[in-house]
Amino acid sequence: MSSTKFANAGIEIESNNHINGNGIKNGSSNGNCYTKHENGSQNGKKKLTEITNGKGTASVTKTQEIPLGQIGNVVSPYTYEIIKESADYILQKTTHRPKIGIICGSGLGNLADLLENADTFPYNQIPHFPVSTVSGHEGKLVVGELLNVPVVCMKGRFHFYEGYPLWKVAMPVRVFKLLGVEILIVTNAAGGLNSTYKVGDIMLLKDHFNFPGFGGDSALRGPNDERFGPRFPPVNSAYDAKIRSLAKKVAEELDMSSYIREGVYTMVGGPSYETVAELKAMKTLGIDAVGMSTIPEVIVASHCGIKTLAFSLITNECVTGYDGEVDPSHSEVMEAADKREADLKRFVSHLIPSINESFLAKSN
Ligand code: HPA
C-alpha cells in the first residue's frame, strides 16, 4: 500500500494499485464516495484511510491521486461525513448560526467587512476546505452578524480555471448547508453582453446558460447522496423570484434602480476571455452577461434546498467587433469592482435585514 496526495487539497490517501479504466480503484470500498463505481466488496469490513488537511482528519475510501487540474472521470470524494467535519469545525469555534451565506466574487471580497463580531477562518485551517489562488481572492470564511442577522461569507471563491474540478468549486455550499444556511447570495464580476449594459451595472440573475453542463461537466456529477438532494434536481427556479423581487425593491429604496438590471448569465471555463465569435454566439442565445463562476455553486445550492439570489457586477463591456476596441483585462475588472464597492456594500447591508425579515425571521 502506498500513500498518495490529492494535490492542492492536502488530502492524503492510502492506495492500492488497482486502478480501472475510469481512474477508479477496483476492490476496496467503504461505501461512501467512489465506491459506487468500484468493483468488488470488502466482506462487510470498511477499509478506511485518512484525509488530512491542516487540523482535520476524516475517514475516506481509498482512491487514486487526483492531480490539480485533472477533471474527466474523477468524481467527488467529499462524502456527507467529510463535509460535516468541515461544518462541525466551524460550528465548534463560533457561536454564530448563519442562515444567510454570501460568496464574494472577484474584487467583491470587501463585502465581508460588513460583518460585525466576526470569527474568521482562513480556508487552510478548515478541514478539507480548498484554498484559492487568484489575486483579489483572499481565502477566508468570515462568520459574523450584519445588523444582528447571522451571516457566513466566503471572502474568495474557487474557480474551475484555477484547476479545481466543479465539485470542489461548489463544496463550500454544502458546508454552508450543514452550517444551517437557507439563503445564498452569490456575487460575481461579469462582462456585459447586452448592449444596453454599462460598466458598473448590477445584473440580478434570473437564469443561467450552463456551458460546462452542456460540455458534460457538473458539480453534481458522480454518485448522489440523497441527504443533500435528489439525483435529478430541477434548476428552473434556482434563482428565487421572490428574493429577486425584494432585491429590486431594496435597490429602488436606495435609489439604485438606474443601474440595476435583470438577465441571463453564463459561465465559461476561462481563464482566457471569450473570442468575438463566441460572444456573438452567446448573444444569439439570449445571454446578457458572461463570467467564470457562480453556476456550479448555484446548482449545488439548489440541489440541497438553499434559495439563491445572485448578481453580477458588470465590470467590462464585451467586445463583439473586430475593429481594435479595448481588450478585456483583469485590472479593468478589479477597477470597476473598486468603483462600485461602496454602493454594493450599501445594497447588501440593506438587503440582508430585508431578506431576514421577509424570509427567515419566522425560522430564527
Ligand atoms: N468574460 C468572462 N469573465 C469575466 C468577464 C468577461 O468579459 N469580465 C469579468 N469576468
Image (tube, helix red, strand yellow):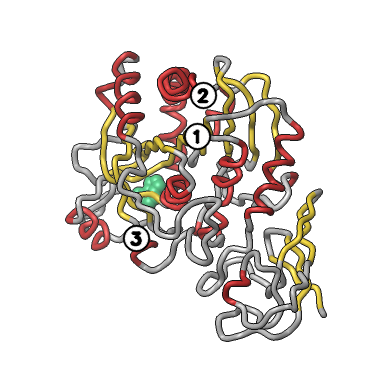
Q: Closer to the camera, 72 or 137?
A: 72
Check disc 1: other Cα within 10 Å, few if <14, some if 14-19, many if 20+.
many
User: Which badge, 2 or 1, comes first in the chain's sequence?
Assistant: 1
Amino acid carrying mark 2 in the image: Ser
The residue to which callout 2 is attached is: 363
Q: CA distance from mark 3 to mark 1?
A: 27 Å
- Spatial CA distance of label 2 from label 1 is 10 Å
Image quadrant containing the N terminus: bottom right
The answer to whether 354 is drawn above or below residue 224 in the figure is: above
Comes first in the chain, label 3 or label 2: 3
Amino acid identity at mark 1: Glu
Q: Nearer the viewer, mark 3 or mark 1?
A: 1
Classify 10 Å Cα crowding around label 3: few (below 14), some (14-19), many (20 and above).
some
Q: Which residue is mark 1?
A: 182
Residue nearest the observer in this picture, 126 or 336 = 126
**Is 263 displayed left or right of 313 in the figure?**
left
Cα separation, mark 3 vs mark 2, equals: 36 Å
Under tag 3, what secondary structure? helix
